[in-house]
Amino acid sequence: MSRPTSSRRVALAVPAALGAFALTVLPAAATSTPAQIATSKTNGVAYLKSLQAADGSYAGSGLSNEWAFSAFAAAGTAAVDVTPGGDVTKNARTVYRNLLSTAGWPSGSPVVTDYERGALNAYAAGIDPARVSASRNLIANVYGYWQTAEAGYFGSSSNYNGTVFAALSLAGARTQAGGQRVPQSLLDSMITRIRANQHNDGGWTFSKAEGNPAQLAAASDIDMTGASMAALCVAGVPNTDADVVQAKNFLKSKLVSSSGAFDSLYGINTNSNGWAVSGLGACGINPQTGDFLTSTGKTPVDFLIAQQFNPGGGFKYLPSDTSPQAYASVDGLRAVAGGGFTAAPPTPVTAGAPKWVAQSTFTAGTATRLALTVDDGAGGLKVCSVALTPTGTTTTLGAVLAAATSAATPAGCVTAVTPSSGATGTITSVNGKANSGAGTWKVGVDGSAFAGADRGKVINVGDTIALRWGV
């Protein structure tokens, strides 16, 4: 989440459950106790609730308060339980889902970070991001920005931020059952790009650094370091990995002993510190002990809580500010609550409200999109968003692949399939690569085990489809 006062403002700020750090076991010298953290969470939630509009909304065009959903979830509050004046018909989740479902959202000229922001916040709100409505599949929307010429990047590679949040959203917005939704080969492609953009000092900035010695030698910032290390960890990289350790050491080098704050390139502020703490949390690194407890007994969490107005609950952006700021309050609360850049939705307390809401079937005649990857088993990964108009409540793998040959973004995801027609039939060749001995085409859906690919395999609304050649 870029700071509104910064020239770096982008359409995405942050954050399935990106690992929460254990704040219940603290060193004796740490000043933020579990009770203080609990109070901070309670007051922070109360402040964010006060930002809800009378119609139940948090989100509008561009950057808006919808990032509150990620903070609510981290703090244990379900979005469906957030209502204006107790009017459950205007609960925040329903209003947000309706917004995401409209044809005019996010804008007439969307960018990939719009959909990444939507996926992260929908997930935290308890809305399956692949099944927002019969026509809206946020996972497929993100897939549509894959850069064929620069595999692993999403959106323009010059906006490195778009690739970081692609990893955070595609890996972080898990299935309703908590499983990894997308194939590891896709996550690995992004991991490679994130590593290539790591600066010599161990951190990252919003700018692309890969292949640019001067940029790689430039000073990093703490906020994108937090987001990047979170992206690595949520995509499967352990916190013992050398690049994650370098990032942790970079953050440690920016600690201010007297306050526990991280010193950002843009000055000491709540948003940057919140991103850094969320990055540590996503990697399972406790920001209240060890390397992040200063000689004066201060920690980054101490700094964040010191920026909070109590009992009002809002956080100020700069230590010198005299009033709370909405974005700072989201970043501050999410970090203090132990959240990464999104969190699995809590169980609602509203009677009858389900933990998840999702479109259950296709609507015949309503255009939609599906997310598809095609992995040839030899390093050739294709990623695309497939546009199709189903004729029933389900469709088939054969119908999806047929649509992909002419209606995929980016184009070229599927060029040929054998057999090319028929209601059923084992798929023996894709894009000119044929089954050979034990090596055959297999399919997985929403992270399921790969099994033989047949044209007749039933595909449901929002399914994330992975084709892979291998034994």
Image (cartoon, helix red, strand yellow):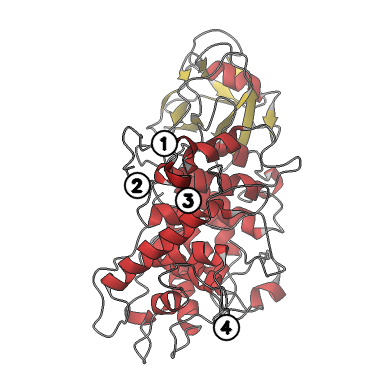
Q: Which label lies toward us, 4 or 1? A: 4
Which residue sits furthest right?
Answer: 109
In the figure, is residue 47 to the left or right of 63? left
- Mark 4 and mark 3: Cα distance apart in space: 27 Å
Give the SS element for disc 1: loop
Q: Disc 3 marks which residue? A: 69
Residue 320: numbered disc = 4
Question: Where is residue 104 shown, x and y percent of the image?
Answer: 70, 35
Q: Disc 2 marks which residue? A: 346
- Mark 4 and mark 2: Cα distance apart in space: 34 Å
- Mark 1 and mark 2: Cα distance apart in space: 23 Å
For the residues bearing labels 4 and 1, Cβ distance under 8 angstroms: no
Which residue sits furthest top?
Answer: 422
Which quarter of the rendering shows the C terminus?
top left
Between 299 and 428, the one nearer to me in the picture: 299
Q: Amino acid at mark 3?
A: Phe
Give the mark nearer the N terminus: 4 vs 1: 4
Give the SS element for disc 2: loop
Q: Disc 1 marks which residue? A: 447
For the residues bearing labels 4 and 2, Cβ distance under 8 angstroms: no
